[in-house]
Image: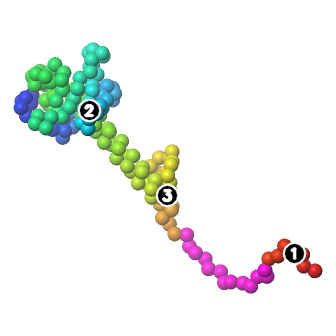
Amino acid sequence: MAVAINATITFEHIASHLEGITSTHIGMVHAVFVGSKKIYKVQSSIDTTKEYTVYRSKSRGYQCNCPSGTHGWWNVTHPSGVCWHVRAAVACALEERKALAEQEQLNTLKQAAGVSYTDVDCATLKRIAERNKKQTPVVTVAPTRQAGFSLLKRA
């Protein structure tokens, strides 16, 4: 099932069709910023000296400048309707989002635990934060009269 060239190819559509994309494929992807626009460069699986550019077009959704992508993915039989370069770029973006969410969670836990730097994992930080939330009971002792302290020797 090929997607027509004028159809908008959304992130959600591609993300729902990531079967067959492995960590090796994701390892062939890296993000590049052109101004404030984020694009992905994907190494060709056939010619390792070539990189294809995956980008998002407002009017057409995700696009790739590989031979298949430049011709509307006419030869793609995958249910996503796009080349593996686009699917690998979307998988990479999902991993980035997950890593950023984990980092945000870690930062929140560090703040809750009152820690500015740590090399411990989230589970340990959660335990620290829970421990710090518990109130230590305050024990009140009746005041006693004590003699004043002096360094001078008493006779």
Asked if residue 43 lies in the magenta stretch, the reply is no
The answer to whether residue 145 is magenta is yes
* Contact between labelled residues 2 and 3, with CB atoms less than 8 Å apart: no
Dot in front, 3 or 2: 2
State the image coordinates of residue 21 (x, y, percent, origin top left): 26, 29
* Callout 3 amino acid: Gly
Name the residue that disc number 1 marks: 152
Q: Quadrant of residue 84?
A: top left
Left or right: where 81 falls relative to 109: left
Please give the residue where the numbered disc 3 appears in the rendered image.
114
For the residue pair 48 and 56, the one nearer the viewer reads as: 56
Residue 34 is tagged as 2
Which amino acid does the dot numbered 1 rest on? Answer: Leu
Q: Does residue 150 sit above or below 35 in this rendering?
A: below
Indicate the secondary structure of the residue bearing disc 1.
Answer: loop
Above or below, 3 relative to 68? below
What amino acid type should be assigned to the residue bearing mark 2?
Val
